[in-house]
Image (cartoon, rainbow, N blue to C red):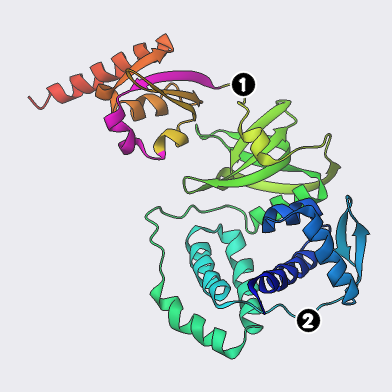
């Protein structure tokens, strides 16, 4: 059997997996995934139909398996089996606690369908993989909080929350959640706030109380990344000119503080930020490399930095 037919068999097997895992599969998406032409995908679908697989749909609209039709269990490759244990280790360290228990039971079900040799492979290798996370885990006030939030997104219903702000004030909000994301060791949600009539970002571990209502969303929403790119309206634009040699030391911290653009110039790297922490957080971060940076804008940040440096100098003078 030549290489062409082996690739075709692998691709057709993978298409079956896609049909089992998704309600609708588009030929265009399959073509992009397997890096073949759409016409090739059409031929593969025809091959499956000729083999007796009841596929519903047609070119241009997408394909799905007939409701109720079950295919034999999918066999995993050795590389796929090894990827499971790596993913499990990552979930143990970085998963939110409300998701961890559900993932554990899902992994137990997955292990149960593996053949004996693959189970032994996992048993032998799992103690040879570890993830080191130096950040302390955050504690939530509500059990199963993220699954509840995800249910509200799926059902398109509002939730009511009591939220503790950064200055320890308690605010009650009714929100429509667009999505959740993990960044810098915290889980966040982006939602439309009916009180502010605007989109807001909330840290999950600061939610003190949550109730899923029966009230439907007031509008339709796009993907979460569409809203993460848009400022809330209370952010300040900051532009810095930074020496190239300090850039490797900034790492991901520049993203955390709202980096939106990084442009190389003759005099250094021009960084543009959108930050909500212009009064405290951003200046205190900037002080760590201020000898390698110039503030282009705003003028108010220059004043804040001068005051901060004077305060530091005054505190240090007591040691002289």
Residue extending farthest front: 2
The answer to whether residue 137 of the structure is visible from this angle is yes
Q: Residues within 10 Å of mark 2 (few under 14, many from 20)?
A: few
User: Does residue 246 sit above or below 17 in this rendering?
Assistant: above
Q: 6 or 304, which lies in front? A: 6
Q: Residue at x 86, y 59 (%)?
A: 63
Give the residue number, with chain letter if any, for mark 1. Answer: 233
User: Does residue 120 sit above or below 157 in this rendering?
Assistant: below
Residue extending farthest left: 320
Q: Position of residue 211 (x, y in %)?
A: 74, 48
Q: Residue at x 90, y 77 (%)?
A: 52
Instruction: Say whether residue 268 is left or right of residue 96.
Output: left
Q: Give the label on residue 72, or none.
A: 2
Q: Residues within 10 Å of mark 1 (few under 14, many from 20)?
A: few
Where residue 9 sits, quadrant-wise, is bottom right
Q: Which residues are magenta?
A: 235-252
Q: Position of residue 109 (x, y in %)?
A: 66, 78
């Amino acid at each position: 059997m030549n290489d062409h037919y082996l690739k075709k068999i692998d691709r057709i097997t993978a298409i079956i997996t896609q049909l089992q895992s998704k309600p609708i599969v588009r030929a265009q998406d399959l073509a992009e995934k397997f890096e073949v032409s759409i016409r090739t995908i059409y031929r593969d679908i025809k091959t499956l139909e000729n083999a007796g697989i009841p596929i519903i749909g047609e070119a241009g609209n997408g394909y799905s398996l007939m409701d109720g039709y079950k295919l034999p269990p999918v066999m995993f490759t050795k590389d796929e089996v090894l990827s499971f244990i790596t993913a499990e280790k990552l979930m143990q360290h970085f998963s939110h606690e409300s998701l961890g228990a559900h993932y554990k039971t899902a992994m137990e079900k997955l292990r149960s369908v593996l053949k004996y040799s693959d189970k032994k492979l996992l048993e032998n290798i799992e103690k040879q993989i570890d993830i080191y996370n130096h950040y302390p885990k955050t504690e939530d006030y509500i059990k199963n909080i993220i699954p509840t939030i995800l249910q509200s997104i799926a059902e398109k219903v509002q939730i009511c929350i009591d939220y503790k702000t950064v200055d320890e004030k308690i605010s009650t909000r009714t929100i429509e959640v667009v999505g959740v994301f993990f960044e810098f060791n915290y889980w966040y949600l982006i939602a439309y706030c009916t009180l502010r009539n605007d989109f807001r970002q909330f840290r999950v571990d600061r939610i003190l109380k949550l109730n899923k209502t029966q009230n439907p969303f007031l509008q339709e929403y796009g993907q979460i990344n569409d809203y993460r790119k848009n400022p809330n309206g209370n952010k300040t634009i900051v532009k810095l000119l930074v020496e190239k040699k300090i850039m490797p030391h900034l790492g991901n911290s520049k993203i955390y503080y709202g980096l939106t653009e990084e442009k190389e110039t003759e005099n250094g790297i021009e960084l543009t930020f959108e930050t909500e922490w212009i009064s405290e957080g951003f200046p205190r971060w900037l002080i760590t490399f201020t000898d390698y940076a110039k503030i282009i804008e705003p003028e108010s940040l220059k004043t804040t930095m001068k005051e901060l440096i004077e305060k530091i100098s005054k505190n240090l003078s007591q040691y002289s």
